[in-house]
């Protein structure tokens, strides 16, 4: 079976390609000029076409011989001056691919969304939800996955734990424990359910042939939900640090700074990211792991070994 993958050169995309190949699927991918080095699998095992999700001709070439589609295009922050926005990539691109799939009568469609999309408080969430709704309103055989925090060896790509290590934990300053209002004792208490990228890829690829997953939405989280303090400590330990000091930081102060600075890539966090962190990002996926016959990979020092040595 031929599976078209949009967003194949990103962090999770590499895991999806490996899982497809390991399960004897034939990936067909779209790639932008200059991104060839981001392909993390044997190029002889994939078919690729240049273009992006706003290039209808390229989309049609990718889909011409496809039997199923995975839409994994996504960004974690916007750069509006460069035209890199949640609307263009999370929604407009998805719309273009869905419309092309309908014209070519390709029914199977799997979407990478995000846990918390239904809240729609931030631009990130709003356009993830709009993409979900557009796909759901189509007549395609869709499945939507909403992962929580995804971790795993990024291979020089953008990944949450590596980014957190570089922008907050490596610095010679205490790590921030964000809190809302005056509730300093709640600092760093918000929780997430980290799930390994390998597990995410397994869910995606297994769902292709599982008819019972059609028209279903799955919130994906790992074995345990952990708070921000624990996430910082675990990442620090995986780097070989015995201890990483942390201090409570009012979220309002950082949000004000982010209002002026989050359009710059060097600023470590955006307003949307702070809002989503404080809201928490948890889910219980234990039944899904059983349904899909997948063993969860724990968020632990051992499984964060890729962060060591720096």
Image (spheres, helix red, strand yellow):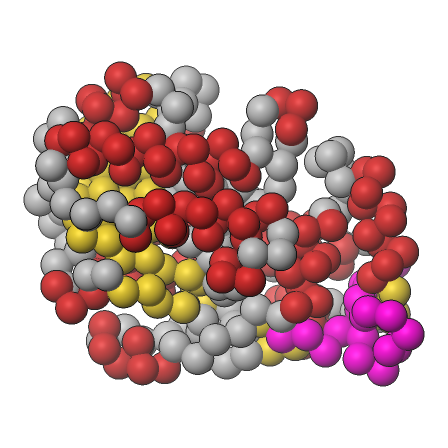
Find residue 101 and report its image quarter.
top left
Q: Judge left or right: residue 181 versus residue 69.
A: right
Q: Does 175 appear above or below 137?
A: below
Q: Is residue 20 left or right of residue 122?
A: left
Residue drawn at the location 15% of the way across and 68% of the way down? 212
Relative to residue 129, is residue 136 drawn left or right? left
Q: Quadrant of residue 76?
A: top right
Q: x and y percent of residue 112 in the render? A: 38, 51
Looking at the image, residue 268 sits to the left or right of residue 65; the answer is right
Q: Is residue 250 visible?
A: yes
Q: Residue at x 44, y 62 (%)?
A: 147
Q: Which quadrant is the N terminus positioned in? A: top left
Magenta residues span 172-191
User: In the image shown, does 21 or 101 lie closer to the viewer?
Assistant: 101
* Rendered location of residue 288, percent (x, y): 30, 76
User: Residue 261 at x, y = what percent?
Assistant: 81, 38
Is any atom of residue 43 visible in this view?
no
Percent x, y of residue 49 = 27, 22
Is 67 magenta? The answer is: no
Is residue 165 depicted above or below 89 in this figure?
below
Query: What's the residue at 70%, 67% (across, down)?
Result: 278
- What residue is at 51 percent from the left and 69 percent from the top? 194
């Amino acid at each position: 079976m031929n599976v078209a993958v949009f967003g194949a050169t990103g962090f999770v995309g590499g895991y999806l390609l490996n899982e497809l190949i390991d399960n004897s699927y034939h990936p067909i991918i779209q790639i932008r000029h200059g991104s060839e080095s981001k392909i993390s699998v044997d190029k002889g095992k994939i078919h690729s076409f240049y273009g992006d999700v706003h290039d209808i001709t390229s989309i049609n070439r990718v889909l011409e011989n496809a039997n199923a589609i995975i839409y994994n295009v996504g960004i974690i922050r916007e750069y509006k001056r460069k035209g890199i926005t949640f609307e263009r990539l999370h929604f407009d691109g998805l719309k273009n691919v869905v419309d092309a799939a309908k014209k070519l009568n390709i029914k199977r469609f799997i979407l990478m969304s995000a846990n918390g999309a239904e809240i729609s408080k931030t631009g990130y969430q709003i356009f993830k939800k709009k993409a979900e709704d557009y796909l759901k309103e189509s007549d395609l055989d869709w499945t939507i996955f909403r992962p929580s925090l995804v971790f795993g060896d990024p291979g020089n790509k953008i990944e949450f734990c590596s980014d957190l290590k570089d922008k907050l934990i490596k610095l010679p300053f205490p790590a921030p424990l964000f809190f809302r209002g005056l509730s300093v004792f709640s600092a760093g208490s918000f929780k997430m359910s980290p799930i390994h990228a390998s597990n995410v890829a397994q869910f995606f690829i297994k769902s292709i042939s599982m008819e019972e997953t059609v028209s279903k939405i799955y919130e994906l989280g790992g074995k345990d939900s952990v708070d921000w303090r624990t996430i910082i400590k675990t990442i620090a330990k995986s780097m070989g640090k015995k201890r990483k000091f942390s201090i409570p930081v009012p979220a309002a102060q950082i949000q004000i700074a982010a209002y002026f600075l989050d359009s710059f890539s060097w600023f470590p966090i955006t307003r949307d990211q702070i809002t989503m962190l404080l809201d928490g990002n948890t889910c219980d996926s234990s039944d899904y792991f059983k349904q899909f016959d997948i063993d969860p990979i724990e968020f632990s020092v051992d499984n964060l070994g890729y962060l060591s040595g720096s």
